[in-house]
Amino acid sequence: MTKHILITGASGLIGTRLTELLLEKGYAVSHVGRSKRVDKVRSFVWDARKHVIEPGAFKGITTVVHLAGAGVAEKRWNAERKKEILESRTKSSNLLYDELKKGHHHVTSVISASAIGYYGINDNEIVYTEDSPPGNDFLADVTRQWEESIDKIKSLGIRVAKMRIGIVLSNKGGTLKELEKPIKLLAGAPLGSGKQEVSWVHIDDVCGMFIKAIEDDSMNGPYNAVGPYPVTNKELTKEIARVLKKPLLLPNIPGFVLRIVVGQMAEIVVTGSKVSSEKIQNAGYVLQYKTLQQAL
């Protein structure tokens, strides 16, 4: 039977590009989200908070790609936003589990997004692998609970692979577009110390890793979806400026200033981690963009 892929959270940066690449490869694709979409693919509606999904969403589906989750950096963090970041992931995963538990479907694999935030606010001298323990900050706790909620699906005899995604570089949005803005305005500068490690990945590579996991039934458990050569925030900022042919005129923006401006969310950019891509490469994935220069 031809693989038919159901993507949750398909309207996001990764879901949009992954859909394009899967359709190019001849896969059938369906989407499930909070609203009905008029697109090239079948679309279904769900509400994870109410624990309901439109009937027929799993008809003919062989693989679920689970990308749903509120954007971590879209809004300033407060107690309500933190709750939404967590529950948008765990409740949607629990809904998937309960629907798949009912049977009467052909789903054999679930490939879920996760994040390198699993490893926590980190020591730049450590190289984190999939065997490293979780951290103890907010995002690490969110990611740990996210993975635990999706891992329940394994008890149904369904293969589960989890992609711990790094900083995604795309000219369609996300982190890179935000980093570009001040540089284009001649107001670019490294953030915090500038020494924090950035484990990045090109959008086509992260999508390629998902496709590899869809096609390779031997892939189980977590994989770091990152490139092989992390860089510091200072190196990333300088390289973006070089590609844009813009000078960097300002000194580093201190971490305390960023915390005043964006609150706790500043931890995303003033801290970093050096994460290994060895496992995904050993699984047979060949990166299209190995260096930052190639990616940018």
Image: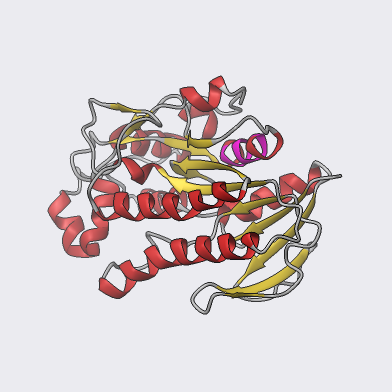
Left or right, 261 with respect to 183, comes to: left
Q: Return the residue nearer the eye: 9 or 151.
A: 151
Colouring mode (rainbow / by chain / secondary structure / one colour):
secondary structure
Q: Name the outermost residue toward the top.
A: 282
Against 39, residue 215 (above or below) is above
Please provide percent x and percent y for residue 237. Answer: 35, 39
Residue that appears at 76% across and 70% down:
56
Q: Is residue 10 magenta?
A: no
**Image quarter (top left, top right, bottom left or bottom right) of the N terminus:** top right
Q: Name the outermost residue toward the right.
A: 1
Q: Specify the segment rendered in magenta.
A: 206-212
Left or right, 88 with respect to 264, comes to: right
- Toward which corner of the image does residue 236 lie, by quadrant? top left
Residue that appears at 46% across and 27% down:
277
Q: Is residue 187 visible?
A: no
Q: Return the residue nearer the eye: 263 or 125.
A: 125
- Toward which corner of the image does residue 238 lie, by quadrant? top left
Chief secondary structure of the magenta portion = helix
Against 174, residue 90 (above or below) is below
Please provide percent x and percent y for residue 106. Answer: 76, 52
Left or right, 249 with respect to 25, comes to: left
- Toward which corner of the image does residue 6 lie, by quadrant? bottom right
Please provide percent x and percent y for residue 94. Answer: 51, 63
Q: Is residue 161 visible?
A: yes
Q: How many marks?
A: 0
Please provide percent x and percent y for residue 257. Answer: 15, 57
Against 73, residue 217 (above or below) is above
Q: Name the outermost residue toward the left.
A: 256
Q: Return the residue nearer the eye: 255 or 267.
A: 267
Q: Is residue 210 magenta?
A: yes
Residue that appears at 66% across and 74% down:
45
